[in-house]
Image: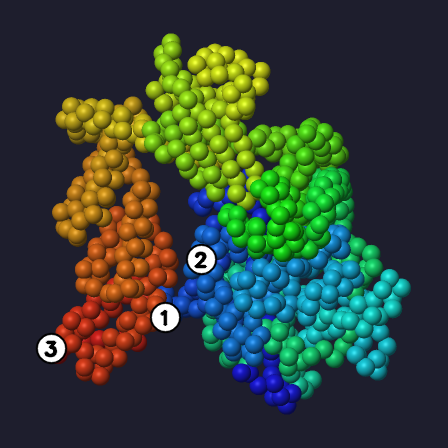
């Protein structure tokens, strides 16, 4: 453990990364749908993962030749908080990175006297001072619950969204046992020594010194101190801003020198420098910022006599000797990204990001009020229902966090039974409570800070909040009141005027949210279309975690069109929603699809509808749908089926055409004629199909020069005819194969595996097929650290057998091939290996 004697004059530093993305999930599907603006990735979470979250878990240390000498887990030395909505997404999509984040916290706990690098975050990033006391406590309690489940300890500190704080927030944090938080210096009003040996100094006269921690005492509205307190770290504002917007992340020594320049060389004793910035700075906003951090933590910090630690450790060795008071403590409070208190999230204060000259943000107040008005109705319905079952609505909601994603009924019943008598937990009451609790979750999600941060009410972040608010209305209020509640919500949102003429929060609701509110209808239609197009036989499926059961009702051919109808039962286990529907699909040979959806009750009351498509279509309650109405993810899935079907038919015709006309095409090229697009299209199609087929063969069979020659021949033919070989499919196939082979290699290295991996890399390199080599390097790293080191130690000791020496040679060759430096393993295969 690091020493803590004052006489050591240690120069502590804390670099804190606030890692966060707003919840982006479609609230009806609970998944993030495709976001084209994030291309080439599926969505922005995935894009930032590739550029930041993964690189910081596997940050490269390179030699002067650009080869990897080691891989560093930056989270071992970086103070960090991960927003629960982000870490939950990472846990589903990239559990290996979450494992490295959690193991980094455990390592820091072991190294720093039980104080871990991980810091909690208020759950879904609401501006705390603008929330009710009840909602603030829920945000903290959900954050604590999430943190403890993932990091196996209680959080010492918490990150407040946008560092938003007032005295009510302070009191809530203290009540929940939070020891510290991190703020901007601009949020401090005054300070003085804890022993009151000097009077309070206003920060307008003398800026607060961020090289020490401070104690903030809770007070009542009259300024009387209660005696309770929370400790606060004020980050170095100029240094943090330089990291975020300057160039000091270009070089680790520059970063270290900048930090070192902020200590007071005239003052004896230990000092600390605190930096806080968005974690996405390290790799996403600043390319290769993660590598700068890695070099800083590995070498530059020590060379500049800096000691990286975390906040908990710093408090244990350097407890506060000063107290501070906060600005606007008994009013709206303050935040780090608004010069006007917390105006950015409630009024047109002048703070904004993006937009055009002359735009305003007068929509902020009406938008917030619209959500406040919904919340009153949703909370009232929730409270009355829960109280009627003899439970406390607040404690039931506060204990809900571990069950957000729970699909099984039994764990939810165990949780509910801690609050409600078992005999009252009927199946209907369980479904009702799951809906109402989900509504509470989405209601809080509607207040996520990002909805107000930018310039325009019709922006994607604000529309996301509107969707959450509408989903809360849909789940949290009785069905018979939905139409009226929607009208009131829309009326309120109409006051949130856009900077685009004729648009507002109400038009955003109508255009981007309400069309998807009939999610069960859209899901039922999409599932039936998928069954017809795919010719599937499965009648029960899980789509986006929602259970769907199909039962064919009728199939008829009339006037060149095919009519198929189905009975569809939908059950969402997370929300308790259930719906029984009838779906009629009209299509021509699987294409030209449209449909009509009716409640199953209507079909049961009028059985003749099943046998009479025209009556079904003409029914006044039938919802008419086309492929354009589907959810984005459903469209993606269906596109795959259609492309496969078209490719099968097109491939047959084009292949025959090319075979019959090859000599004529060769003659045209020989005459130095460029082929017209009418001819290059079919040629390109066939050559790409042959290329993809050959790629499949190379994956399925062992390495062969013949395959390389065949691929080269196809590229040569494509070049001759002036067409392009699309390497997308080859990239996907090779990436999958290499990944699996490398995982197999970590389980047990063999010559065959090494040869296969090397051959596939040869294909990628020779033919310019893009693969994510960093993903392969991540998987291979443990092999380098364990298998190669172990074999090399036996080789150096002269006890390695022939097969071990041969394997060592293979692995070193492969390590070099994927850009690992092997200089520390000087190796010359002996003429005769030991047998």
Q: Which residue is mark 3?
A: 835
Left or right: 584 as drawn, with respect to 757: right
The quarter of the image holding the C terminus is: bottom left
Nearest to viewer (mark 1 / mark 3): 3
Does residue 473 appear anywhere in the picture? yes
* Label 1, residues with CA under 10 Å away: few <14, some 14-19, many ≥20: some
Whole-angstrom CA distance, mark 3 to mark 2, is: 42 Å
Residue 324, quarter of picture: bottom right
User: Which image quadrant for residue 667?
Assistant: top left
Q: Which residue is mark 1?
A: 69
Residue at (68% x, 29% y) in the render: 480
The residue mark sitting in front, 3 or 2, is: 2
Does residue 664 appear anywhere in the picture? no
Q: Please, is residue 393 above or below residue 216 in the view? A: above
Q: Residue at x 62, y 74 (%)?
A: 312
Farthest right residue? Answer: 222
Label 1: element kind? strand
The mark found on residue 811 in the picture is: none
Above or below: residue 715 compared with residue 610:
below
The mark found on residue 95 in the picture is 2
Percent across and percent down for residue 827 are 22, 75
Q: Position of residue 737 (x, y in %)?
A: 28, 51
Report the side of 443 relative to 402 (left or right): right
Q: Is residue 640 left or right of residue 138?
A: left
Q: Which mark is in front, 1 or 2?
A: 2
Which numbered disc, 3 or 2, marks the residue that appears first in the sequence? 2
Q: Is there CB contact under 8 Å for labels 3 and 2?
A: no
Q: N-terminal of the two: label 1 or label 2?
A: 1
| Label 3 crowd (10 A; few <14 / some 14-19 / many >=20) | few
Q: Secondary structure at mark 3?
A: loop
């Amino acid at each position: 453990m690091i020493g803590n004697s004052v006489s050591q004059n240690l120069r502590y530093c804390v670099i804190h990364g606030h890692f966060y993305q707003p919840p982006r999930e479609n609230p009806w599907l609970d998944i993030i749908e495709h976001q084209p603006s994030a291309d080439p990735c599926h969505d922005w979470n995935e894009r930032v993962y590739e550029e930041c979250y993964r690189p910081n878990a596997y940050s490269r240390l390179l030699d002067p030749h650009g080869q990897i000498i080691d891989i560093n887990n930056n989270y071992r030395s970086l103070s960090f908080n991960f927003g629960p909505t982000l870490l939950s997404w990472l846990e589903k999509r990239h559990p290996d990175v979450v494992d490295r984040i959690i193991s980094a916290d455990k390592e820091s706990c072991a190294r720093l006297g039980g104080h871990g690098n991980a810091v909690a975050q208020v759950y879904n990033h609401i501006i705390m001072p603008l929330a009710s006391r009840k909602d603030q406590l829920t945000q903290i309690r959900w954050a604590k619950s999430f943190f403890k489940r993932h990091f196996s300890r209680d959080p010492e500190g918490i990150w407040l969204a946008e560092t938003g704080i007032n005295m009510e927030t302070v009191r809530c944090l203290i009540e929940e046992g939070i020891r510290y938080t991190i703020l901007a210096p601009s949020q401090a009003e005054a300070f003085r020594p804890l022993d009151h040996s000097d009077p309070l100094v206003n920060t307008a006269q003398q800026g607060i010194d961020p090289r020490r921690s401070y104690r903030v005492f809770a007070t009542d509205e009259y300024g009387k101190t209660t005696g309770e307190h929370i400790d606060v770290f004020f980050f170095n504002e100029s240094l943090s801003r330089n990291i975020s917007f300057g160039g000091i992340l270009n070089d680790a020594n520059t970063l270290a020198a900048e930090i070192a320049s902020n200590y007071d060389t005239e003052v004896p004793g230990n000092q600390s420098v605190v930096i806080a910035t968005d974690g996405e700075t390290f790799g996403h906003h600043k390319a290769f910022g993660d590598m700068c951090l890695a070099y800083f933590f590995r070498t530059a910090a020590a060379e500049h006599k800096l000691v990286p630690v975390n906040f908990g450790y710093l408090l244990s060795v350097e407890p506060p000797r000063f107290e501070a008071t906060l600005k606007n403590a008994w009013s709206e409070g303050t935040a780090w990204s608004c010069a006007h208190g917390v105006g950015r999230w409630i009024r047109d204060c002048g703070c904004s990001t993006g937009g055009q000259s002359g735009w305003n943000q007068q929509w902020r107040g009406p938008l917030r009020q619209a959500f406040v008005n919904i919340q009153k109705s949703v909370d009232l319905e929730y409270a009355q229902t829960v109280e009627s079952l003899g439970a406390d609505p607040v404690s039931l909601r506060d204990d809900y966090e571990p069950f957000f994603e729970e699909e099984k009924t039994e764990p939810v019943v165990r949780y509910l039974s801690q609050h409600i008598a078992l005999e009252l937990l009927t199946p209907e009451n369980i479904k009702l409570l799951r809906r109402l609790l989900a509504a509470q979750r989405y209601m809080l999600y509607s207040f996520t800070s990002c909805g107000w941060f930018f310039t325009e009410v019709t922006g994607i972040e604000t529309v996301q909040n509107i969707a959450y608010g509408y989903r809360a209305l849909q789940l949290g209020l009785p069905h018979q009141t939905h139409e009226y509640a929607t009208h009131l919500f829309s009326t309120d949102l109409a006051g949130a005027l856009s900077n685009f003429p004729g648009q507002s929060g109400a038009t955003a609701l109508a255009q981007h949210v309400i069309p998807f509110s009939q999610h069960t209808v859209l899901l039922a239609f999409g599932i039936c279309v998928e069954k017809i197009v795919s010719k599937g036989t499965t009648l029960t499926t899980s789509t986006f975690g929602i259970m769907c059961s199909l039962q064919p009702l009728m199939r008829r051919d009339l006037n060149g069109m095919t009519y198929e109808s189905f009975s569809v039962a939908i059950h969402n286990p997370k929300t308790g929603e259930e719906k029984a529907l009838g779906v009629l699909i009209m299509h021509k040979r699987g294409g030209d699809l449209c449909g009509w959806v009716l409640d199953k009750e209507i079909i049961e009351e009028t059985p003749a509808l099943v046998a009479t498509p025209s009556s079904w279509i003409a029914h006044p309650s039938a919802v008419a749908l086309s492929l354009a109405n589907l959810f984005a993810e459903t469209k993606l899935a269906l596109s795959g089926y259609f492309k496969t079907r078209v490719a099968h038919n097109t491939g047959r015709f084009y292949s025959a055409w090319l075979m019959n006309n090859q000599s004529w095409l060769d003659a045209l090229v020989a005459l130095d004629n460029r082929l017209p697009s009418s001819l290059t299209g079919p040629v390109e199609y066939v050559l790409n199909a042959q290329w993809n087929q050959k790629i499949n063969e190379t994956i399925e069979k062992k390495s062969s020069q013949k395959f390389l020659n065949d691929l080269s021949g196809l590229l040569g033919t494509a070049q001759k005819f002036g067409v392009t070989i699309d390497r997308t499919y080859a990239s996907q196939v090779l990436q999958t194969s290499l990944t699996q082979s490398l995982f197999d290699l970590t389980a047990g290295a063999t010559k065959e595996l090494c040869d296969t991996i090397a051959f596939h890399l040869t294909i990628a390199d020779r033919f310019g097929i893009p693969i994510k080599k960093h993903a392969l390097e991540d998987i291979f790293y443990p092999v380098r650290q364990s298998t190669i080191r172990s074999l090399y130690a036996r080789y150096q000791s002269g006890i390695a057998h022939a097969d071990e020496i041969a394997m060592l040679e293979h692995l070193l060759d492969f390590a070099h091939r994927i850009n690992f430096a092997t200089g520390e393993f000087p190796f010359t295969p002996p003429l005769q290996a030991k047998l």
